[in-house]
Image (cartoon, rainbow, N blue to C red):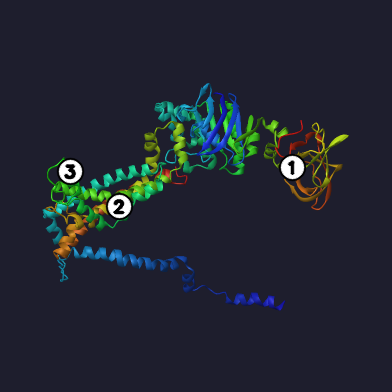
Amino acid sequence: MADIAMQPRMAKAQIREATTWDQLRTNRNWLGFWFMLPAMAFLIFFLAYPLGLGIWISFTDAKIGRPGEFIGVENYEWLWGDSIFWLSVFNTLLYTSVASAIKFAIGLYLALLLNENMPFKAMLRALVLIPFIVPTVLSALAFWWIFDSQFSIISWSLKHLGLITQNINFLGDVTWARICVIFANIWRGVPFVAITLLAGLQTVQPSLYEAATLDGASKWEMFRYITYPLLTPIIAVVMTFSVLFTFTDFQLIWAMTRGGPVNATHLMATLSYQRAIIAGQLGEGAAISSAMIPFLLAAIMVSWFGLQRRKWQQGENND
Amino acid sequence: MSSVQIRDVRKSFGGFEVLHGVSIPIEDGAFVVLVGPSGCGKSTLLRMLAGLENITSGTISIGDRVVNNVQPKERDIAMVFQNYALYPHMTVADNMGFSLKLRGASADEISKGVARAAEILALTPLLDRYPRQLSGGQRQRVAMGRAIVRDPQVFLFDEPLSNLDAKLRVAMRTEIKELHQRLKTTTVYVTHDQIEAMTMADKIVVMHDGIVEQIGTPLELYDRPDNQFVAGFIGSPAMNFLKGRVKVNGSAGFEGPNGVKLPLASAPANSDGRPAVYGVRPEHFTIADDGAEAEIVVVEPTGSETQVFAKLGGEQVVAVFRERHQFNPGDKVRLKPDPALVHLFDETTGKRLNA
């Protein structure tokens, strides 16, 4: 009896005003801040710092081996009057728009095809991924060989079929070179689009198609009124990524053409590398890279609006 | 409106036959419920009727027309799916008007048709909402609205109430039945819930393992099940089955497990000593001095009635009483089945033996 009477009194004695430290110690937001710190440090160190440094260098006359001084927008003024820079902007836009559009069309077609019931479905799905898993440089080398001016298998085949008499100078001709690099980019990029859209297609309830069948929809009407609207959120994501990857492409071009012939396939990324690293003009190269930022932001804005949750995806009664 | 004839229909998936020759006549304007446990083939049959599955052999006709090779959209049927299958990106009005839109109806016709169906189902205030913004019961009604808009020959329902909570299910049950009484469209309704079947159907088709066990009105099935499966499937709590032998010496009787004597109104001819299954519904037990002794195990009052689980000859049976007896577990009572309402089944085939 005495014990029981004692305990509440002792417990009571320990109750005191919570200090600031006590409040902090039990505050979940404060704790959350500490858990967030490593990730934040990681992002600042590896993403924000290089980006900031790149932008800073673009405002200096840094060269390899020389820190450089602040020169304002001189690099940009110089680029404004540089026809090769404008050619690379044109090339990049052409490369991105043509390749992305075709990647989307083929990717969607493949996704719809792979979503059908057919024999060896799992194997075909795995096969589609192959271009994606081959290292870029390796596939670029393969394409370089396929499009070689002397040993191209395409020229060889066409010659043996008697369709042409001379080798096609795939990577030496302006138009052909552009077609070739775009083709290679499409070949590499289609699996990503196809597999992602396929994943999206599989989230569509099969009973919706059954209901549409009974409602009298043809295959095309099902695609037009059911599949496509339900797929738009995924399309927005996958095409944003596809455009970003294509716009910043470097490896394929560098391995296949190095920007040639006569800068016809120079993208902003390859031109930046050439000016900054090969020619040593760090400031100017950084300015070319920084000039990509507005384009990329524009692409992201487009998808940001495309990605906004549509009204039908919302759960609340907010009519 | 149309009658539907299902004649000797079979269905195989690969080499595996799931429907073994099913024949069901459905009169014009009837409300027919296909009921059976999971995997009995009832949903498959409904999907074959809708045209979503091919018919392996046999014929299905709607009206005078054999529809085996008719496209689903040409069959003039409408189906309500278990998960509603509403188009998530369309408003209620668009969902309901989709079939008219595909048919090429004018905007005016579509909105009239939708308005009419919405009024029948009290959906008018919800027409601009998206399916996500609706409750389960409202979605269910939209799914029915989509069917009504088409004004079909036959309504098909595939377990439409399974995703609703118990209270709503009862309310929707009544609503669907009311709707049928109003529209008088031939309806085929699939469910695994025998209460749904009993309460809604004009005619119940009990299916089991790909065959039709019995077709009849709810009370026919309840009062006179053709076999032990139907007897056990229809009714809740389920019928009690006691194995034993028919005894005929002077008057008919039944010797249950451990020699328990049970009454029998009349025995089938030449059945003395024949092994059989004695079936008695829980509500057909009475407490009587000449009953068989049983020991009460559990008492479950539900308010309107009391369910009593007891050991009768070592077997557990359940009895339901509307009167409020004072029972306690361990009590000994004398349970007497009403001999006029007892069912007798063959021990091996499960076929009904008594008249």
- Residue B60's spot in the image, x, y percent? 53, 27
- The quarter holding residue A32 reads bottom left
Residue B148 in sight here: yes
- Residue A316's spot in the image, x, y percent? 47, 46
Residue ID at (17%, 71%): A67
Three-letter amino acid code of the residue under disc 2: Pro
Give the labeled residue for mark 2: A131
- Residue A143's spot in the image, x, y percent? 22, 52
Viewer-proximal residue among B125 and B353: B353
Callouts 1 and 3 close, C-beta under 8 Å: no
Q: Chain of mark 1?
A: B
Give the labeled residue for mark 1: B240
User: How dense is the environment of label 3, judged by Cα within 10 Å: few (below 14), some, or many (20 and up)?
Assistant: few
Q: Chain of mark 2?
A: A
Three-letter amino acid code of the residue under disc 1: Asn
Three-letter amino acid code of the residue under disc 3: His
**Gap between marks 2 and 3 measured at Cα:** 28 Å
Viewer-proximal residue among A226 and B234: B234
Give the foreground label among 2 and 3: 3
Q: Secondary structure at mark 1?
A: strand
Query: What is the residue that sits farthest to the front in this orientation?
Result: A160
**Gap between marks 1 and 2 measured at Cα:** 66 Å
User: How dense is the environment of label 1, judged by Cα within 10 Å: few (below 14), some, or many (20 and up)?
Assistant: some
Residue B267 relative to residue B74: left or right:
right
Quadrant showing the N terminus of chain A = bottom right
**Gap between marks 1 and 3 measured at Cα:** 86 Å
Residue ID at (67%, 32%): B218
Give the labeled residue for mark 3: A160
User: How dense is the environment of label 2, judged by Cα within 10 Å: few (below 14), some, or many (20 and up)?
Assistant: some
